[in-house]
Amino acid sequence: MQLSGEVVRVTIYIGESDRYHGGNLYRAILNFLRSEGAAGATATRALSGFGAHSRIHTANIEVLSSDLPIRIEWIDLPARVDRLLPQLQQMVDDGLIVREPVTVVHYAWGGSQAPLAHPVVRVMREEATTVQPDAPVAEIVTLLLERGVRSLPVVDGAQRLVGIITDGDLLHRAGLTTRIGLQRELPDDQARALLLALRQSPLTAREIMSTPVFSVQTDEPVRTAVERMVKHNLKRLPVVNEDERLMGMVSRIDIFRMVASHRNEASDDDAPRTGRTVTELMYTDAPTVYVSAPLEEIVRALEMSGRRRVVVVDDDRHVLGIITDGDLLRRSQQKARSRSAGAPAQSAGWGGAYRTSVARRRRTRHRPDDIARDHGADGRSIV
């Protein structure tokens, strides 16, 4: 499960003696959240407190209360909070529920020394926006614009994956004149005319979706997802279970975040080298990639080398710059902030994601390049 950037914290204040269907309310809330795939929640019992009834409940041995305050804290993705919060409101008939935006700075699972060996279920995003095969094209475009997503899995009544719709499908099969990412840039009259034309179109998801769909299973390693993306030149993959039911989506950005946030202290804490010259002090096993390398190759180089940076070279093996795991993480966070703010998602390649080394006669300077714009051949953005 991917949990990073801007998320939501829900805090629930109830009493220890509060009941739900014959059992403790706090246990019922935790069981409900776990059964619905929530990212995580914690219940704590307070030492003392009072609420709307102005009665002080305390754990003081002299006035031992059997109804101490209980605080439940739940942090999760906004879409999942929107889906589950109404049920929690029905369960809590005497208490307080607070919702607030928070930022996840670090979220790690621990364990494996190889981040790409983790199962896909740990990095995927579960709250995938989907459509049914009979969904009209106007509904599809509206969903893409409102949710800020780049593709829509098509599922049947049993949530089994049957197809997927991307920018390219809409451009080539539905008569869309501009990419979804540029729709917000259209003048109001053009946008209204386009939406009207789409509403009159008889096309449905079944006619415009791409099939067959390349997917990955929840228990397969992240490395398999990377290899599948490289082989088929894809930017994201639907994640399914053994019954082909859709469980979520995993994208390049999700994988970059995981690799960049992975902290293998041993990789950067090599024993100090002794020597007086650069030749004696330098490492000769630094991973390298060509300037035209796809992003998945960069991720593989970071993971396989055990280091946190790769050197970018040209065809003659001249050094052009360096890409660190931090560069990938910052780029993905910028992308996420752009989408959460409702701004048109910029289509960006990674030609400028590395730090360029500009060789001059007098000295060498290192500076971050501006992110270059780039698009796939089918009109879909690179990231």
Image (cartoon, rainbow, N blue to C red):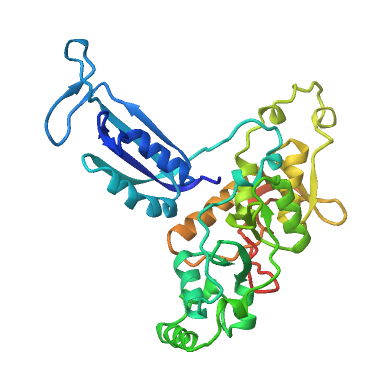
User: x%, y% of residue 85?
Assistant: 35, 50
The C terminus - image quarter: bottom right
Q: Residue at x 17, y 29 (%)?
A: 50
Could you say which quadrant of the image residue 17 lies in?
top left
Q: Is residue 47 visible?
A: yes
The residue at the far right in this view is 316
Residue 235 shown left or right of residue 159 in the figure: right
Q: Residue at x 63, y 82 (%)?
A: 173
Q: Residue at x 43, y 63 (%)?
A: 342
Q: Residue at x 57, y 76 (%)?
A: 205
Residue 29 shown left or right of residue 122 in the figure: left
* Vertical order, 181 against 177 (above or below): above
Of residue 163 and residue 194, the one placed in the foreground of this image is 163
- Give the tally of numbered discs: 0
Q: Is residue 357 visible?
A: no
Of residue 372 and residue 302, the one placed in the foreground of this image is 302
The residue at the far left in this view is 54
User: x%, y% of residue 327?
Assistant: 62, 47
User: x%, y% of residue 52?
Assistant: 14, 37
Residue 200 shown left or right of residue 293 in the figure: left
The N terminus - image quarter: top right
The residue at the far top in this view is 62
* Vertical order, 57 against 96 (above or below): above
The residue at the far front in this view is 22
User: x%, y% of residue 361?
Assistant: 77, 50
